Image: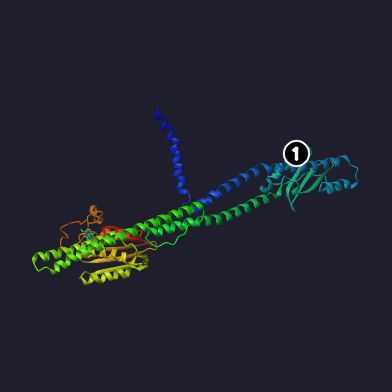
Amino acid sequence: MSLVITEVLSAPRQLWRRFAIWLHARMPKGLYARALLIVILPVVLLQSAVAYVFMERHWEVVTYRLSAAVARQVATVVDVYQTFPDDPAHSQLRRIAALDLDMEVSILPKGPLPAPVTKQSLFSLLDKALTGELSRKILQPYWVNTSFTGSLIEIRVALEEATLRILVARTQAYASNSYIFFMWMAIASIIILAVATSFLRNQIRPILRLALAAEEFGKGRDVQFSPRGAREVRRAGAAFLEMKRRVERAIEQRTTMLNGVSHDLRTIITRFKLSLALMADSNEAAEMRRDVDEMERMVEAYLAFARGDGGEVSERTDVSAVLEELKADTERRGIPVSMKIEGEPVIVARPAALKRLLANLVGNAQRYGKTLEFTILNDGESMVVHIDDDGPGIPVERREDAFRPFYRLDEARNQDDGNSGLGLAIARDIARSHGGDIELDRSPLGGLRATVSLPL
Ligand SMILES: Nc1ncnc2c1ncn2[C@@H]1O[C@H](COP(=O)(O)OP(=O)(O)OP(=O)(O)O)[C@@H](O)[C@H]1O
Ligand SMILES: [Mg+2]
């Protein structure tokens, strides 16, 4: 039973879901545009509704009432004409009409009425109203022209002995100043829009500043930020600052601790070395010396990994200069390197960390490749650096593993050199602390392509 009910319910719900998705896709994505929409939409809807009601009801009713008044006046003129037939030249009638009714009356000789005027769309409401009201008040045949020159209406009534021609101002029968209402509505809308725009811009600026500060901090850059704006935004800003402070404190603590550890370990290793130096030369002593050397190297590597790059400050760094240096070093080892640069090769980053990152990747490529290629691409949004080699590469399923600390792909491949298996882990750590990442891929040269992408 309950299954049936959910089946029934799910149809409109699905429809609603589809509508929501459709609407979501069409809605503006920015907060500014959305907020503006929330302000503007009700105003436009309200004004449209008011305008519709006004047009439909008020304007029409007023025009009908005015037309009815004009029709009554015309009926009065006709009545006076018929009641006082002896009035010489009907001067009294013309006087009353002109003074009291604001109408100009003239008497034309008897004749047929002109053909009906083809109606203009602008005054179709007036035509309808006036002919309707005249039909009710006047029994004689009549003729109306609502678009007579000079904003006048011409009405002719055919009587037995003559035709009455009456001219009356169009404004008497027609609520013609309604456009003022629309003009005011348009002006009000523009004022609301202007106020809302400037007000919203001021409200949204602090949010943008907070987003920017968080982004910069995520890229490991120094940020100057103080919370501003509405209370909620200020609260978010304060929370961000508190979080930033805590992260910085944690980094500082780690650095202090590791400095202590490294100092203690180095002291012991130095003591070892001293004792070994004092020992007589023997096979065992030589072996121990090698072991102590390797231990020293590894301890340095672990500590460098754990220490990260706390304390270094971001600055504009020329990536091409770093790669030129690494290129020269590679070529000294007899490995040819080609280099391609597209766009400005400059990025804001911690220089020593960036150099370590690239040196780790190039070091790997040197170890496995016979020719290398370095590429720098700057598309204005991010910087991408490819380090390509023509070595054996890394199979797809093991590329992620290669980033794990202490991971060596193939123990046999690099037994001889004291590699720690930390190079890629450190490199990725540095890339991520700048808001970027490293990917491994197949190189066009046949070996491995390490791609560093960093946001600008
Ligand atoms: N260009 C490359 N071609 C083929 N294999 C690679 C390449 N770069 C890295 N690898 C493989 O990935 C593993 C991990 O590399 P990573 O740089 O992390 O460590 P490592 O080079 O062995 O040691 P370290 O860099 O700390 O001296 C390497 O041991 C190697 O097997
Ligand atoms: Mg390495």
Q: Quick one: 254 or 76, which is closer to the camera?
A: 254
The residue sitting at 42% across, 35% down in the picture is 10
Read off the residue under disc 1: 135
Q: Quick one: 188 or 285, which is closer to the camera?
A: 285
Q: Quadrant of residue 82?
A: top right
Instruction: Count the numbered circles shown.
Output: 1
Q: Quadrant of ligand 1?
A: bottom left
Q: Quadrant of the N terminus?
A: top left
- 327 up-or-down from 208: above or below: below
- 278 up-or-down from 82: above or below: below
Residue 197 in the figure: left or right of residue 390: right
Task: Spot the residue most to the top.
Answer: 1
**Residue 330 at x, y percent in the picture:** 23, 69
The residue sitting at 47% across, 55% down in the picture is 207
Label 1, residues with CA under 10 Å away: few <14, some 14-19, many ≥20: few
Q: Quadrant of the C terminus?
A: bottom left
The residue sitting at 79% across, 39% down in the picture is 140
Residue 349 in the figure: left or right of residue 205: left
